[in-house]
Amino acid sequence: MLGRALRMAFWVTYDHLGKLILANIVCALAVCVPAMLAYGAILTNDPVVQLVVGVPLLVLALGVVLPVVTAGLAYLANELIDARDGAFADLFTGIRLYWRRAIALGQLCVIAVGCLVTSTWFYAAMLRDTLPWLGFTISALALWCLVFVSLVSLMALPALVQKRGGVLETVKLSALLVLDNPLFLFGLGIQLLALAVVSVIIAPLLFFLSGSAAVVLAMSAYEQLARKYALREVQKAGRPVPEGGLTLEGVGGGIRVVSRGGVLVIDEAEDDYLNRGLRDFIFPWKG
């Protein structure tokens, strides 16, 4: 399933490279302006400036601007996957539709990550001399909770854009997806971390695309999960599948369930994002 998500993300990015680069630059500038101001304030080594200016600007960049522009990117990526087309303006449509809920999700994430990072360090350090085993146990638990929260955050905005639910409903859905698909989403997290490392250290030019590419990959992963659960619902419901297949509403722009040898499967033969290979990359005009 992760392989299909990676393939889908690659071809979505390949087909819509220009608008994704443009969207990435706009979003990166929106985040970098308050982030750089926060960085400058922190470098002053003045506790008052750091607390009054640096911390609020950092929270603004990571807890407000970042989730808002990411929601816009997620909406754009969802249009590219479902409709096989989209416009740069979809970025702003997504921001307009989801900015309030995105901010709420971003603030929840910042608070949770801040508490867990602090706990990971605090208990190991404070109980090191008295009850080291207890301190390291609590710190390890906090670390695993941090990993869990990080994986939930990967699915939060894709779930928000796809399901269009409230904040708590989105958090619950994202948490259930992580609990039901831990290896898949852990693998997704590793891929996104690798993309970040490559774009920052190895190939800095990827900075102009990496944010959009990461969101496209997260949306592609959510799409694979949506197909998985849509098929499961059809199987549980025992719905009759006509000879031409049963179209799944709201999934992948019209993916169908078909019966093959008495087994219900998703027919992805018409999904061009999943049915292209090296030849299409080298000779795109022959597609």
Image (spheres, helix red, strand yellow):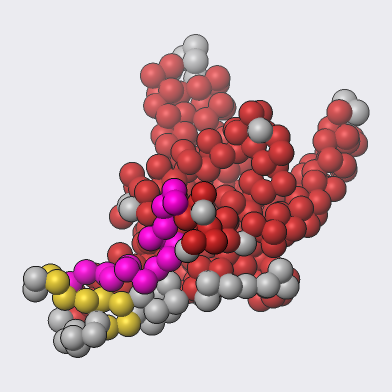
Q: Position of residue 245 (x, y in %)?
A: 24, 82
Question: Which residues, given as a range, are shown in magenta?
Answer: 264-279
Classified by dominant secondary structure, the portion drawn in magenta counts as loop
Q: Indicate the position of residue 197 as horizontal and vertical percent values.
A: 60, 33
State whether residue 87 appears in this view. Answer: yes
Q: Position of residue 124 (x, y in %)?
A: 50, 22
Q: x%, y% of residue 160?
A: 53, 68
Q: How many numbered dots are placed on residues in this image? A: 0
Please tell me whether residue 271 belongs to the stretch shown in magenta: yes
Q: Compared with residue 61, is residue 87 higher up or lower down, i.e. above or below?
A: below
Residue 178, relative to residue 255: is it above or below? above
Decide: is 142 above or below 109.
Answer: above
Quadrant for residue 27, please give it. bottom right
Residue 55 falls left or right of residue 214: right
Q: Which of 226 and 117 is in front in this view?
A: 226
Residue 9 in view? no
- Identify the residue shown where x is 57% and y is 56%: 13
Q: Which residue: 49% across, 15% down?
A: 128
